Image (cartoon, helix red, strand yellow):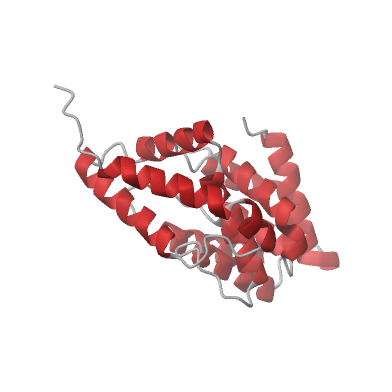
Amino acid sequence: MADPEILRTRFVRALEAARGPAGGPDPVPYAENLLARWQEPQRRYHTAEHLTAVLDRVDELQRYARDPDVVRLAAWFHDAVYLPDRSENEERSARLAERALPEAGVPDGKVAEVARLVRLTVTHDPADDDPDGQVLCDADLAVLASPPSAYAAYTAAVREEYHFVPNEAFRTGRAAILRQLLDLPRLFRTPHGAAEWEATARYNLASELEMLSLPSVDPS
């Protein structure tokens, strides 16, 4: 379970580091707003637990980042707006960052970078000269390299988020996403991600795609 107190502290540290000595308003209300978003009832996978996991992976990969605290803020905002039946969640999340972070005292250049990173999670395809993008995307995709039971729980949670989608339509859409990921030359761009997560993630994705390709069974 995600600990709200620990998450709140992590946000405050990242925000204070990003805005520097000039400071700004009390960061706690911004943390509370984001925590409330991550705890919305429509979420089953994109929850505070997912946020915690991404932040943990950013910490693990921070040595590759140009500005780790900007990456941490991007992690906080990357699914801050999330409605499963909407297709523009990343864009709306980026715009939320562009509104909230200047008010919170973050310099314009860093605000722009946070928003850029959030938008990058649409494709998870950072450039070779984009270390911050590589860290955020690797952290977000690290769940794909989970052990079998954790990967099964992840796929079940994703299905629950899309409970309103008929089974065949979900299978088709999910299969398309899996193929898009498998078609990437590399899922993970940091040296650690490539060495530690790539092979397992591809195995998990291919296995899930194979299962989705099996004929569905009519429960009746």
Instruction: List x then y, in percent, for residue 47.
Output: 52, 40
Q: Residue furthest top?
A: 220
Residue in front for this viewpoint, 40 or 128:
128
- Image position of 56 with respect to 66: above or below: above
Image quadrant where one finds the C terminus: top left
Residue in front for this viewpoint, 82 or 163:
163
Residue in front for this viewpoint, 89 or 33:
89
- Image position of 181 with respect to 146: above or below: below
Residue drawn where x is 24% and y is 40% of the image? 214
Q: Residue furthest right?
A: 21
Q: Quadrant of residue 69?
A: bottom right
Instruction: List x then y, in percent, for residue 51.
Output: 59, 45
The number of numbered discs placed on residues in the rendered structure image is 0
Q: Is residue 220 visible?
A: yes
Residue drawn where x is 38% and y is 43% of the image? 208
Instruction: List x then y, in percent, for residue 25.
Output: 74, 57
Instruction: List x then y, in percent, for residue 12.
Output: 75, 50
